[in-house]
Image (spheres, coloured by chain):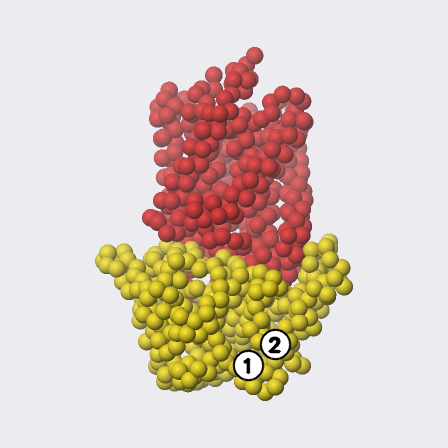
Amino acid sequence: MKRRTFLKSMAATGVAASMTGAGVLTREAEAAKKIDIGEVKSVKVDVLTETSWFNNDIFKKNIMDYGGVMTNQYTIPWEWDNAGGYSTLITVTTLEGDERKILMDFGWQKEWMDYIYEEKSDVASLIEKNEIDFYVLSHFHLDHLWGIESTLKRKQDITLYAPKTYYPEDMALLKDKAHHKAKDKNTGKMMHICKNDYPHKGKLILCDPKGEKGEGIYRLMDGVAMRMFDVPILFRVRGENVLYFNVKDKGIVTVTGCCHPGVLSLLSYARKNFKGYKPYGCYGGLHITLFETWDPKFDDIIKGVKAFKIKKLGCNHCTGWIWAEKATAAGVPVVKGTDKYKTYKRYSTVAKASNVFLTNGDTVTF
Amino acid sequence: MNASTETEKNFNYFFGLLNFAAVFCIVWFLWYVFMNPNTVMKLYTPMYGFSLVVVFLSGIILMTKVIDYSAFKDNLPAKDNLILRGIILTVVSFILMLFINYIIFWGFIGKYGIAYFSPDSIVAAGGIGAEPFTARENASTAIVYFLTAFLWISLLWSVGFGRWPWQKLSSGVVAWSRVFAIFFFVSIVYAVLFHPHVCYLFYPAQSKAGVDPWWGELVGTGSAFFGLGLVLCILFWIIVSDMLWEGYPWKLLQKDGEDTFVKGLITFIATFVLGIIILFILTKIMNVVWDEAFVGGQYTDGPDFRYIHAGEIAVFFILAVFILKNYFNNFPNAGPLWLKAVIRTLIAMAIGMLIYWFYYSPLAVFFLARVEGFAQPDDKSLVWTLLFLSIIMIQWEFFEGWPLKKSKD
C-alpha cells in the first residue's frame, strides 16, 4: 500500500516526499515557487512567562462549570487568582550583528504581567526606551491577549501584528478601552475578566494566510517571516500567527504562542515553501497535552518529531510536562530549563524536577 | 395494488420538503438548548454531549432494530393512538438514554468493573490529569466507542442475519436472543478496536489492561479514530443497502423468505470490504485536498483526523440516505431495482455533499455556533449528524412517519 510505504519512509528518513504539493506541479516548478526569506545570525528567546494558569485543576473546573472547551472564552468568569500569562521576548541578531527585539504575546493577568515586566525582566524599560521593534500577537486566547494593558500602558504607538480572525470583543480590548465581564452562574453577578484602558494607537497589521504579497507570509526583517494559519481553535478562537527564523548555517526555527496548527505542520509548511529548507529547532507552547493527560496520538507526535530530525526543541506552556518528559525519554533533543522559575512569586503546580520545560526566566538561543 | 405502492405514487414531495425543514428546525432547537456551547445546557464539551447523543441513538436502535418493539405493538399502551404512542416511545427512549449512560455505564460497569466508564471512578483512582472534566471526557469517549461497536453489530444483524437462527421462535425469544448475541460480538469488537486507545488516555498508560494500539504501525496513528472511521464507513454500506437498495443484494441469499447464516456472513464480509474501500477512497481524496498526512501531523495533517473525517463524511452520507428515503420517498420509484439503487445512491451522495458543505460553511457558525474551519480536535460533526438521525428515527419509527405519512394502511 502506497500510504504505508509513505509512512514508513517518513519514519526512516524524516523526508516527507509527498509534501511537495498535490502532484500538480513538478519538482522544478515547486522549487522555483519557493520563497527566500533571507537569514539571521542567531535568535535568542527569553521566556518571560509561560505559566498561563498556575493550577490546572482550577482552570479545568472553570471550563467544566461553563460548558467545556468549545465555549466562548468571554463568557467564563475565570478565577482571577489562577491567571498568569504567556509572553516571550525574542532577540534577533542580524547577519550584520545588529540586535532587534520582538515582543510576542501579552499575558493574561495584568498584575502578573506588571510583575514580569518590571521585577523579573527588563521588558518594561525596553518598551519605554523604544527598544522593541514591534509586537506580535500569536492568537486571541485569553492568556496571550487579556493582559495587554500592562504592555500598552507603556507604549501604545507601535506596530502590532495580529490575526485577521478577531471577534468584536478582541478588537474592543485592543482599540476601545473595553472592560469585559462575564456572569457568575452561581451568584448572577457580572465579574471582571479583562480590561484595557490604553488603546493601541500604532499600525495594526491584520494577518491572513495570503500574506502581504500573496506569498503566504509576512516578511518582518531579513531572515524572519511570519505566517498566519487560519485554523479553528478551542474557546471559539480562530487563527494563529507563527514566526519563522532562518538561522545561518543551522536552519529553520519556529517560535509560537501555542502552536495550534501542530509543530510538524509548521515545519512541513516551511519545507514546501521556503528555499533551502533545513529543520533546526522550535520554541513555544506546542499544544499537545495541555491538560496533562494522554492520548495515543501524542505518541505519534513524538515519532514524527524524531522523523523530522529537529535538533533543538524548546517547549513549555501548553506542551504538557508529561509529553516533554516522554519525548526526552524517547530521544527527542528537548532543551532543559533551570530552577529559576522557583524564584518567582508563583509557579505551576505541575512543574517537575525533570526541568523538561523552558520555564519562567529561562533562555534558549538558536 | 398494495397500500405502500399507493403511498409511493401519491407522495407529495412538497410536504416532504416541509417536513424535512420542520425536522431541521427541531434539531436546530435541540442543538441550541442542549449542545450550543454558548447557550443553555452546553453539553457539547464535546465528548460528554457526544456520548449522550450516541447513547440516545443506540437506545432507539435497541428498541427498533434489536428488540423490534413493533412486534409487541399490540401490547403497548395507546396502541390505537399513533401520536400518544409516539410520545410514549420517545419518552421511553429518553429514559433509556439516562439509564444506559448514568446507571449502566457510570453507576454500574464503571463503578464495579471497568473504572474508565465512570468519571467518579477515574477521579477516585487519582493520578495525573484525573480531575472531573477530563475524567468525564474520557469516560464519555469510552462510551462512544462501545456504542459505535453496538451500532455496527446491531445494524449488521438487523440487515444481514435478521431473525436467524431463531426464525421459528416467538418475537420475545428473538428479541432476547438478539440482545445477548449482539452484545457478545460488540464486546469483542470494542476490546479489539477501541479498548487499547482508551487505556492510553491515561498517564501512565494502562498497559496491563490494554495492548499498545496494534494498528499504529499499519495506519500511521495509535488513535482509535482509525477504527471509528472504518466502522462508520461500513455502516454507510449497511444502511445504503438496507434503505436505498431495499435490502438487496443480500435478500437474494434468503431461503424460503427467511434470513440465513450465509446471508449474514456475506453481508458482513461485503460491507466490511466496501467499508475499507470507501475509507481508502476518502483518505485518497483528502490527500489531494490537503496533501498526504504524516505521522505526528496535527489538524488536517494528522492521520487520526483523516480517519475520523472519513467516518464523519460517511455519516453525512448516511444522514442523506435517511433524508432521501423518508422525506423524498426514496426517489426514484420507477424502473428496475438496480437502476433505482444506482440513482438513489448518487442522489444520496449529492445530498451528503450538500450537508458537508453546510456543516463547514459560515451557515453552521450561525446555526451550530461552530468556529469556521477544519479539523479542530474538539469539533465533532458526528454529534450534530447523529442527533439529526435520532430525530428522524423517532419520527419514522415511533410516530411511523406522522404527519407526513398518516397511516401505513
Depicted B29 relative to depicted A54: above or below:
above
Depicted B406 relative to depicted B106: above or below:
above
Tell me the distance, in whole angstroms, between the alpha carbons under discs 2 and 1: 9 Å
Residue B274 placement: quadrant: top right
Name the side, left or right, on which B222 lies relative to A146: right
Chain name for mark 2: A
Q: Colour of chain A?
A: yellow
Q: Residue A217 versus residue A110: which sits nearer the camera?
A: A217
Residue B73: % across, % down: 42, 24
Q: Residue at x 42, y 25 (%)?
A: B402
Location of the N terminus of chain B by quadrant is top right
Looking at the image, which residue sits at the far bottom? A97
Q: Is residue B192 visible?
A: no
Q: What chain is the red one?
A: B
Name the side, left or right, on which B40 lies relative to A276: left
Q: Residue at x 30, y 64 (%)?
A: A179
Q: Residue B74 versus residue B82: which sits nearer the camera?
A: B82
Q: Amino acid at mark 2?
A: Gly
Classify mark 1: helix, strand or loop. Answer: strand
The crowd level at tag 2 (other Cα within 10 Å; few <14, some 14-19, many 20+) is: many
Q: Residue at x 67, y 74 (%)?
A: A278
Q: Amino acid at mark 1?
A: Val
Residue B238: % across, % down: 60, 36
Q: Residue at x 68, y 27 (%)?
A: B338
Residue A267: % across, % down: 62, 68
The crowd level at tag 1 (other Cα within 10 Å; few <14, some 14-19, many 20+) is: many
Residue A78 placement: quadrant: bottom left
Which residue was labeled with disc 1?
Answer: A92
Report if the CB atoms under discs 2 and 1 are less than 8 Å apart: yes
Disc number at residue A223?
A: 2
